[in-house]
Amino acid sequence: MNGEPVIAVEGLTKSFKGKVVVDHVDLSVKRGEIVGFLGPNGSGKTTTIRMICGLLKPDSGSGEVLGYDILTQSDLIKLEVGYMTQRFSFYEDLTIRENLDFVARLYALEPRRDYVDRTLARLGLTNRQNQLAGSLSGGWKQRLALAACVMHEPKLLLLDEPTAGVDPKARREFWDEIHELAAEGLTVLVSTHYMDEAERCHRIVYIAYGKVIARGTVPEVIAGSGLHTIVVRGGDTAAIARRLKGRDGIDQIAPFGNDLHVVGLDPNRLERSVRDAIAGSDAVAEPDATSLEDVFIRLMSQSTDNFANGAGAGHG
């Protein structure tokens, strides 16, 4: 990755029906970088992505995507971006090849057959090219959608929760392909709810209810949270969890299998409360690494829901 910015936007703001959905978001992504865009439902991820790719005009803010002005050159941005939406948006009564041929016509790719053949081979779809899209499993639909997004050889790939409802094997294969594309110079911005996917990104940006509240590499975001974790093993963890509730220094209590993960900001207060709770039991407690999930749960709990009254919900 070099220092060349592919996305460089500042102050992106968008409101719907008087509710601010995206609130002065700054975002910078370098060429060949995979950036994870994370946050709860309704936090403004989809709206931000649509503004970046030229599908939606911001109320305020400025910047460039692929060197084009987002306010005045959105049509040029669209030609060089691949955008994979949350929902499968191809014709289910057409075959894989027919769908890709249709997309090739939209982009006026010539010779069309060569583009389609190369894309089928690249995404491992050649043997299934005559299968109706509607008969595909979630993983194969996802692969078709990715194929359609990269066939015109975009410089930027925007993925909006691309692996929702896809099995773990298909998700891993999808991410292997994304890393291969990034290694060839493609830039990727991907929204996801999966922590294992976030950890496969070069950097992550966490947005909650329209505001960016954390950004950096995964280790940087975890370190910046200031959280500490103790794992309790053995004994009656359910009873210990009940005793821990409301104690000083306890921020989160979460069962993981037979263990109990206890999280807090002050390591001394955290340890004191855990020691008191396990006193007289067979349980043992020891410090452990704080997980990305622990950090995000805390970030969510600290954020104010800008749609708390229900108005305007539905803009991701």
Image (cartoon, rainbow, N blue to C red):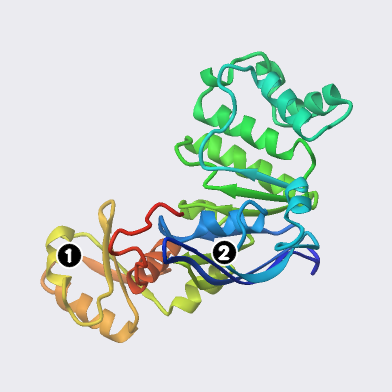
* Residue that extends furthest to the top in the rendered view of this protein: 130
Quarter of the image for residue 51 reads bottom right
- Mark 2 and mark 1: span between their CA atoms? 31 Å
Quarter of the image for residue 125 reads top right
The percent position of residue 312, horizontal first and vertical second, equals 38, 57
The percent position of residue 194, horizontal first and vertical second, equals 47, 51
Left or right: residue 242 compared with residue 61: left
Residue type indicated by callout 2: Ile
* Residue that extends furthest to the front in the rendered view of this protein: 17
Question: Which residue is the site of mark 1?
Answer: 241
Q: Secondary structure at mark 1?
A: helix
Dividing the image into 4 quarters, which one contains the N terminus?
A: bottom right
The percent position of residue 265, horizontal first and vertical second, equals 34, 81
Left or right: residue 204 compared with residue 7: left
Residue 68 lies, with reference to residue 93, above or below; the image says: below
Left or right: residue 151 compared with residue 296: right
Say few, some or many: other residues with alpha carbon within 10 Å of mark 1 (under 14 / 14 to 19 / 20 or more).
Answer: some
The percent position of residue 58, horizontal first and vertical second, equals 60, 64
N-terminal of the pair, mark 2 or mark 1, is 2
Rendered residue at 72%/25% (across/down): 102
Question: Which residue is the site of mark 2?
Answer: 204
* Contact between labelled residues 1 and 2, with CB atoms less than 8 Å apart: no
Rendered residue at 57%/16% (across/down): 93
Say few, some or many: other residues with alpha carbon within 10 Å of mark 2 (under 14 / 14 to 19 / 20 or more).
Answer: many
Left or right: residue 40 compared with residue 35: left
Residue 238 lies, with reference to residue 120, above or below; the image says: below
Nearer to us in this view, 60 or 191: 60
Counting the numbered discs, the total is 2
